[in-house]
Structures are given as structure tokens and as C-alpha cells.
Amino acid sequence: MLRDSVADFAKRGTDIRRVRRLRDTQPGFERAVWQQMAEFGWLGILVPEQYGGLGLGCAEMAIVATGTAGALTPEPLTAAAVLAGGAIARSDNETLKRELLESLVAGALIPALAWQERAGVLAAAAVAVRAEPFEAAIKLNGSKNFVAGAAGADGFVVSAQAPEGLALYWVPASAGGVALDLQPLADGRTTGMLRLNDVVVPKSHLLASPVCAAAALQAALDTTLVMASAEMSGVMGRALDMSIEYMKTRVQFGKPIGSFQALAHRAVDLHIQRELSSAVLDDAVALFDAGASGARRSAMASRVKARCSEAGLRITREAIQIHGAIGFTDEYDAGLYLKRAMTLSAWLGNAAQHRRRYAELSAAGQEGATA
Amino acid sequence: MTAPDFGTLTDDDFRARVREFLTQHYPTHLRFVLRRARLAEMRPWYDILSQHGWIAPNWPREYGGMGLDAGKMIILLEEQERHGVSRVPDHGIVQVGPIIMKYGTAEQKKYYLPKILSGEHIWGQGYSEPNAGSDLASLTTSAVPDGDDFIVNGQKIWTTLAHDSTHIYLLVRTSKEGKKQEGISFLLVDAASPGITIRPIRNIAGHEEFCEVFFENVRVPQANLVGGLNKGWTVAKALLSFERINIGSPRRPQYALKKLEELARAKGLFDDPGFVDKFTALELDLADLGSLYARYVEVVKRGEELGQEVSMLKVWAMESWQRLTDLLLDTAQEYGAMPGAHAMDGVEVDVLSPFYYARPGTIYGGSSEIQRNILAKYVLKLPA
């Protein structure tokens, strides 16, 4: 049923003209479509039932992520509902958590997670933003970069070093001292560079205390790696289908170009990458839904992000080559798929970064086993 | 001896039983030999398997096999790979037996099957010819009816272990009419027949594993035809699902990965980010192959037939395996050009054997290029 509603949305709820129209605009998506996603229940798939969500798993979320990304939907579904929502759902300020999750599920509030500071640094604990007591409140200072889904966000979940350790704070976009610089991404969306200059929030905005903040952040990030991979799987699937279709219809030298072995073998190699990606994605989803934790969960997340990023980029790059000159035009859709793949690949660590992370995690695992 | 009824065991119990059996009975000096072992070496193991009723895992129990379902079949293959068990000369078990069961006459079943089980008959496969490799249907070795016999003339090549075989099963041309595939027949031939000459061919690893086989006016009884005149192509194509899946098992390249890891650890290469990047990419290529393989195993376990898409498993498994042994060679530096085991930084490793061992996988059983043709045609449905 979920699969049907996603397919129906991809067919009628969005289209490529809308995607093109929203490119390089702000916020770059439509609140009406967001509301529709809320009505479908998609924003609450991973949110526990007692907070108004559906309490389902990665299997269901992956169906939505794959389907919407395959249609190049610009709405910040994974950034808000998986990454920010995931961090909120694992926090320990019950009152704030309930309030934020219920409005997220209803589509009334779009949160974004501001965790990363430096390019290339994937460690969630590498945080220089500081939170210090200020009168009866908390004062935040520092910078966050590459904030996904920042455009149109109603507020930010910000990781910061408090005197007691790493914590998460809720910072409304309208709070004084918050400056957001939106920089363009290749796919026509934006990423946020967030400056926090003496931002004062009440103590009730401490969302996750140092008791759970680091674990909440890591779990949300790992889950989002899997969902970004699901999105990549949707993008590569569509790009490859499009290329294969073209190979069947485009005629040169009196024959469809798909009959030429150089191109046919190229397409087969891309298909193998697609199938490997989808097999690893299935395994990752199953492992996450079985409740894996720690290094095992993180290693799986890196494994799937590495495979899908590499395969997605390769398939969409080669889609341009298979189409020839028409593939290099802005008018043709192949370029849109390449650009979405570039954006998804670079988000939260590309293939090379995640192979390194996988190696580090498995080396640590082995030392742990021998110790 | 009749095999015990493995059907009553759970998969986990069966796996434990296989491990126990291999540990108890498999000759230690034959673990991980990294080449196709000869019959003389493997005969004791053949006899043990035969005596315990383990020689024919894929055969139904009424024919004296283990009668394993697809799931248990895969477990057995996985455990053999894990333990480093060499194949016995098994063409009789894997190919000829099932083909005779499906297409053979009552006499053929009665005569041949027990002799395969006992190891009295060892079979070699006579398919490829000098001018019919990837394009197998172009084969020209001819069988012309003469009284109750066929007269066979021609040449087969790349016949694995023909020099250890008592019998050879042949694809021969019995008609030049119509499509090439429709003039081919399947014949059972006694290798001791007059007119047969077998010459071993040395491979690049220095081993004599395959042979060329010459047929000069060789008389073969017409009663040795299987599946009817000009039906050989259909007979030969009737491969079972688990045999097609086994070639893509992620277990086989594990040995090379293990050796590479040992060598790299001894050389301190895990502190070298350049090496770690290459190593991890290959490690993940294999891990991800495992995910893809598991998907097909599920299909087979459900009792469904595998489609042509299983070709991608062979392509990825064999090509990943080769990339792994390429890195093993590079990592050994000077020793990457020296045959045999050498002590390098405190570990003793033979890098050339795994390298050579991984080469033919992209050639035999349909080369990687042929597999890509198959995938392009039947899976992507690209035009010819």
C-alpha cells in the first residue's frame, strides 16, 4: 500500500516541470506538497506512535525515500524526517520532544539538524560550538556548516559543547543572533551555513542532555546514511532505466545503439552496480530494523553509503555519456539525475570517506575482539 | 552405502554435521591447494565420500545420492569452500549423472549411475573445440551413423582432467541443417576406445589440468546417445540452479583476501592510507557480493528457478577475485614475480598460486564478455 501511494505521488503529486521550476529558488520546495507528505504519514514513519507517528521502520522509510528521490522531489524529506527527526526522537527532554515531534509529523514544523562544522569531518563529536549558562538561560556561539534542509526550516537542532559534555539544543530560526547563509547545491537546492552569535535560548530548549546526545546524534546520522543511500538507489534506478530505454530507441548506423557491444557491456556493468547497491541496501535496512547498534550498525551504514554513492555517481555520469550531446543539455533530464546524485554523494560523506570509516570501524572492532 | 536421510536435519544441524565430517575425514594436506587437484591425489577422498554416501549431494536418494534440497546444497558448498576442500573429478556427479537421470534410457541409468557413485567411472567434459569456444554451437566434431554405431571424428580442447578420465561426454555435430544449435547431439564415450588420443596441456601456472582430445574414426554405440538425435544442445543447457549460483559464491575469494590481509599486516600496510583505501574497496566488493549472493540463495531456497540474471554473480565474483589477487601480487613487490612460498616480513606466503588460480574464472563456463552479452540480451533486453 505504501509502495502504491509513493508510486502515485511520483506520478501525480510531483513532476519534472515542478522540479525544474523550483530549482535555484528559495526555499526550493513547496509547503503544500510537504503538507501532503504529512497527510500520507511519511513524516511520521520513523516517529514512535506515542508521539503521533506510525512507529514503522527503515524498510518503510526506504520505500518512500527511494520513490520520492527517483522523482527528484525537492522536499527535504530525509533531512527533516530522518536526520533531524531521528535526533529529536532519541532525545531526553520529554516535553520538548513531544512538542517538536507532534508538529513535525503534522507537517506544521520543519526541523533541520546542524551538527557538522568542518568539511570532511564525519565525527559527530567534533564540535566547537559552545553552550554556556547565561543568566537563567543558555547562550550558544559558533558555526555550523552544510546544514541539509536549512532553507525553509523553522528551527535547528544544534549540537554544542556544554560544560557537562555534548548536548543538543533547539534553536528557532527566528531567534536573535541566528544568521543563515544559504549556498547553492549542484541540484538546485541549497545547503545552510549557520552562524550562532550570542544566541540565547531558554533552558527548556536543552533537547538532549549529555547523557544521550552523542548516541542520539550517531544513531540519527547512521539511519540517515541508509536513507540517503535509498534515495541514491531511486536516482540511479531511474537514470539507468532512462539510459537503457534510450539505447533501445536511438538509432545510428542503421541500428539501435543498444546493439553495439561497447555500449551494451557498459550498461550491464551499470546494472550490476545497481543490483549490488540494492542488495546491500536491503541488508542494511534489515540490520537496522533488527535493532543493530554500535560499530556494527555504523559499519553497515558506511558500507551502504559507500556502495550507493559510488554506483549512483557512476550510473548518472555514464547516463550522460550514453545519451551523447543531448545528455549534456539542461533541457534533457539526465543532467538533473547526475546533479542529484552529486549532491547525495557529497552529503554526509562520499564513497571514499565511508570506505575509510568502514576500515576504521572494522579495525577498532578487531582490536576489541582480541583485547 | 546408502546416505543417511539429511532431509530430517535442520539447516544448522546439517551445517554442523558437514563441518564435523570435513574435519574428521578431509585430508589436511589437500586443504587450499589452489589448483585443480589430480585424480591420484583425490582418489582417497573420493572413496571416503563414496563409502559414506556423501559422493553425490545433488542426486536423489533413490539413485544413491544425498538428496539435498537447494538450501542444504548451498550449505555444503559453502562449508567445502570454507574448509578449502578440492573438487574431486566430479563431472560424472555434477553433469553426467543428472543428465542421464533426466534424459537417459533405463539401460544407461542402470549401467552408468552406480559406476559414477563408486568412482569406477571418471568423466571428462568434451565441449570446447579449437574453433568453438565462446561460440560453442559452431562445434564441428562429427558423429556419423554407421550400423549400430556412430563414427566420431574431430578434436576437443580444454577438457579438464581428460587424462584422469575413463569416459568423456561429448557434444558432436550430427546435422548441418538449420540452426547450428539444432544439429548437435550428446554422446557418452569410453575414453579407452580405439582412435582417441589425449594430450595434456600445460597452463600458465605450470599445471597440467586440461587436455586436448583427438578423435579419429572412433566407434561409439548409438545406444550411447542421450536425449535423442540433434537434441544435445537442450541436454547440455539443463544446468541446475545451485550449480549456476555456486560459481558466484563469495567464499572462494576469501582465501586470497585472508592472505592479502596477513601479508599487509606483516608489512605494516594498514598504517598506509593509500593501501587501506585499495584494500577496503576490495573488501567491500566481496562483502557486497555476499549481499547479492544471499539474494539469489533465497530464490533457490524458495524452490524457484534462477533466471539469466544470475550471470552477474559470476561476473562480479570472478572479477573481484582477480582484482584481489592483483593487489596481492603488487603488495608482495619483488616476490610478486617469484613462484612458490616465500618468507616476507615474518609471514610465509605464496602469492603467485592464488593469482594464477583466479585467472580462468573469467574464461570458463562462459567468459565474462559472454555473460555480459547474456545480461544485455535477456535481462536488459537490449536489441541484438
Image (cartoon, helix red, strand yellow):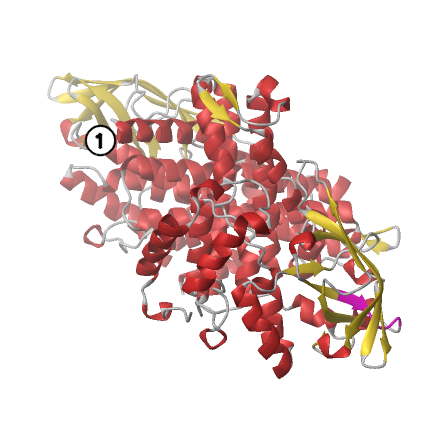
Relative image position of residue A7 (x, y in whole percent): 49, 60
Give the amino acid at mark 1.
Ala
Could you tell whether B222 is left or right of B244 in the image?
right
- When asked about the image quadrant of residue B358, the answer is top right
Front residue of A94 and B290 = B290
Q: Chain of mark 1?
A: A
The answer to whether B299 is drawn above or below residue A322 in the figure is below
At x 51% / y 32%, what residue is drawn? B281
Nearer-the-camera pick, A293 or B259? B259
In the image as oriented, which residue stretches furthest toward the left? A136
Q: Position of residue B59 (x, y in %)?
A: 50, 69
Q: Nearer the viewer, residue B92 or A250?
A: B92
Q: Is residue B124 above or below residue A350?
A: below
Which residue: 43% across, 42% down? B28
Q: Quadrant of the N terminus of chain A?
A: bottom left
Mark 1 neighbour class, 10 Å CA radius: few under 14, some 14 to 19, many 20 or more = many
The residue under the point 35% across, 43% down is A82
Q: Position of residue B100 (x, y in %)?
A: 62, 74
- A151 left or right, relative to B315: left
Mark 1 lies on residue: A213
Camera-side residue: B217 or B145? B217
Residue B86: percent from the left, percent from the top?
52, 48
Q: Is residue A121 left or right of residue B36?
A: left
Q: Relative to B150, is B359 above or below?
A: above
Q: Is residue A62 among the parts visible in the rendering? A: yes
Magenta residues (range): B171-176
Q: Residue at x 68, y 67 (%)?
A: B236
Residue B375 shown in magenta: no
Q: Is residue B307 visible?
A: no
